[in-house]
Image: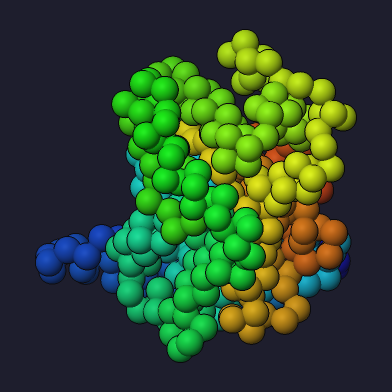
Amino acid sequence: MQRHDRLYALYDDFDADALRAHQDFVDLFPPVDSRVALEYWESASEELADRKDEIRAAFPDDPAFAAVAARATRDQAFTALDLLGKYDRAVNVLVLDVDETLRSAGSTDNEIPRATLHLLTEFHEAGIPIVICTGQTLENVKGFLSQGLGNELVHSGDLSVVYEAGTGVFTPGHGPDTKQLLYEDLDESVRSVFDEVRSRVLPSAPDDVRRGCHLQGNEFNVTLKPNYETGSERARGLIDDALVHLLDLLADCLDADAEAVRAYYADADPEIAGVLDSEGVAAGNPDAVSDDLRATLDRVDVAYYEADAAEIASRELNKVVGVEAALDVLDVDDPFALVMGDSKSDLRVMEYVHEHDAGVAAAPEHASGRVLDHVQSTDDLVFDEGAADEVLRTVWALERLA
């Protein structure tokens, strides 16, 4: 019997839904000081073990089937088996965005769900390193990771944080390599531009931007965030205004024509072009941008996240560069990564692993259009908003089957 047929038999002959319910209960049962509750948990654990033993006895040639059925649905298990047939290897590192990926303002109240956190601990215990890859500041990330995953995992030496979209890498437990400030490798001509933009970005801003936005506490990137709720109409209008302000300020700091700078970034990013058009702000002809100006702008990235942030960052420092540095510290020399994300900065990592045959990509259903296009055209690992565990369960099954 082929493995696909045996997997069909597994889900046809056994109540996998009940098995998963028992596994989730045992995994996620909150610690309570109650003898009755503890006895209930022990009873569920014994029932779970008995059900797994029945599956192992029925499929002696597939000892992983019990673990697969306990965490993966039928569809997730078959997706895992298809991925194994396509790539002939398991994922050996997780590269995970946080906001609107592991957690969602819309459906998880900006908390990483317990099911997702528990699965991450399971991957950790299976020896799979975790790279948290985010645009957030390091201090923000350290706080919720320690609270959600625990200090022991965070400081295990097998977790790395790529923060501020690749300007730095933090890998606790690695001595002098624990914190790498990648922006220090940039030459002074670029760093000085960021220093000037940062010093002037709020004092020179229009009244609505200065009063309605705040400067995120980055080490290097210059990021304007709305004071209003992310995703709201007020936030959308403010970030559109902030984007125009950043473009014009960058032009002023470079002593360049504002229309030329706008034209350069509008030509590179349709979303930026759309904002400029809706704001009624003129952009020049991108072909008229001088070679000298283009050489500088090629090193400076302007990013727009609708109703969320407007940002100036270094093109030489992005999530790909950060992930490469993290993998080097974690000693992952032949990566096959699960990359999960929702934005353009995550897309770069997805495209990188695809081009190097070094992993698979997954995204939430509300990800940006270009991210969804990439994910759907590769392995179609699209998950519901706030339900990152759907893909983690699939990859867990892939790891077990491999």
Q: Residue at x 70, y 41 (%)?
A: 371
Task: Spot the residue most to the bottom.
Answer: 175
Give the x, y percent position of residue 316: 68, 58
Quarter of the rendering containing residue 218? bottom left
Quarter of the rendering containing residue 61? bottom right
Q: Residue at x 60, y 63 (%)?
A: 188
Give the x, y percent position of residue 357: 83, 64
Give the x, y percent position of residue 183: 56, 65
> Looking at the image, which is closer to me, 366 or 116?
366
Q: Is residue 216 above or below residue 339?
A: above
Is 185 placed left or right of 24 in the picture? right
Q: Is residue 383 above or below residue 64?
A: above
Quarter of the rendering occupied by the C terminus:
bottom right
Q: Residue at x 47, y 19 (%)?
A: 237
Q: Is residue 68 above or below residue 303?
A: below
- Confirm whether residue 70 shows in the render: no
Q: Residue at x 53, y 51 (%)?
A: 194
Quarter of the rendering containing residue 286? top right
Quarter of the rendering occupied by the N terminus:
bottom right
Is 212 placed left or right of 339 in the picture? left
Is 240 placed left or right of 44 in the picture? right
> Looking at the image, which is closer to me, 152 or 248?
248
Give the x, y percent position of residue 146: 33, 67
> Looking at the image, which is closer to me, 251 or 176?
251
> Looking at the image, which is closer to me, 129 or 232?
232
